[in-house]
Image (tube, helix red, strand yellow):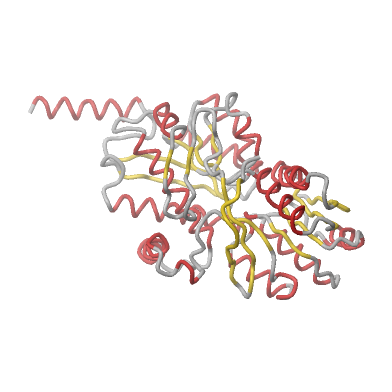
Amino acid sequence: MIAHLAAVASALALGSSTPGVTPTTITIGGTVPVTGPAASFGSVGPGAEAYFKYVNAHGGVHHRKIVYTYLDDAYDPAKTVLLTQQLVEQDKVFALFDTVGTDNALAIRQYVNASKVPDLFVGSGVSEIAAQHAQYPWMMGYLPSFVGEGAMDGRRIARTTPKAKIAVLYENSDFGKDLLDGLKRGLGGKAKIVSAQSYEIDDTSVDSQMARLRASHADTLMLFATPLFAIKGYVGANSLGWHPRVYVSSVSISPDVMKVARYAATPRTVDNSISIAFVKDPTSPVWRNDKAVKLYRSILAQYLPGAKPLDVYLYYGMAVAYSMVDALRRAGANPTRASLLRAATHLNEVNPFLLPGLRVTTSPSDYYPLKKARFVRYRHGLWVLFGKLVDARP
């Protein structure tokens, strides 16, 4: 009896001294653009939440259920700051998880580190987060490096079409600039960027940018854009009667996004687009009998009925939630924010939602969890993998 009371007292002490941790729950939170110009990414939140509910139904993490609160910041960094402060100071979350968006994550980075609250696996591959980890150790990205992705594209163009004339539509942000910088590195002086046009996230049109890109007589178009603007880019090219080879950023290739682009423009404009992938595509017949894809569908059916499996951002949400659960387990039965950060910086994980051959690996000096990817080509409504795993580091 005395031992039991001591154990309860110890658990209660833990709950009071470690924000967001009680004997039965562990609370995490984050911001997701459910509305606004990047609302396509909003499905990441429900996808992750569904996976956490699945984990809870199977015992949780060290017998604690995960409570996940995600708030809509409409992709507005100013709102991200306010809502993150609410999560930390009012909701008392144990950790932040998967802040979606590059500018959004960078807007809260100083606050997160001053507060010593882990913000893990944010939805960005911007180089600044990983490169400055010594100064800001409490934030870690998840996506492959944007510079690395641009370099992958550049190396492929230099190898396969070295005389290409390249036009670039890019977001005027660290996201778009990283991709453009990587492209230049990967080209290595081969091929030629003949025009690069930027857009702002609150622009209503990219028609003028597309007209200037078309006028450059480029035969290759890079859409370094979020989903809405990738669609606008396809539509703009088609309306100008321009049908270049297209490379599109990996953040915009969910099949439901591509389906909209294909119908809003034409199949001719969209088909044969090239991008990179690191997760399995649950809409592809290639993975029909894959265990992780079957689990994805069963979790949606049980915990998110009515959701569309075609929305691969739901799948990505589960993939990143898997890594979060792994980190929480490795943080120990009596977790602290410091032990969670240690766990997150010592991962060597086989995540079943990722492509075969990929591992999630980190260290205190390596804040890029995903270091490889594969090329994919869009054909007849499906992304088709080709080639081997390619280095995606910057």
Reply above or below: 298 against 369. Answer: below
Left or right: residue 74 compared with residue 216: left
- Name, please, the residue furthest toward the front: 159
Residue occupying image coordinates x 71% and y 69%: 270
Left or right: residue 290 compared with residue 81: left
Viewer-nearest residue: 105 or 355: 355
Viewer-nearest residue: 159 or 35: 159
Viewer-nearest residue: 379 or 231: 379
Query: Where residue 100 sits in the image (x, y, percent)?
Result: 57, 46
Numbered disc total: 0
Left or right: residue 264 compared with residue 96: right
Query: Where residue 235 sits in the image (x, y, percent)?
Result: 76, 68
Query: Where residue 363 sits in the image (x, y, percent)?
Result: 49, 31
Q: Quadrant of the N terminus?
A: top left
Residue occupying image coordinates x 32% and y 40%: 25
Query: Where residue 70 sits in the image (x, y, percent)?
Result: 49, 47
Residue occupying image coordinates x 84% and y 61%: 210
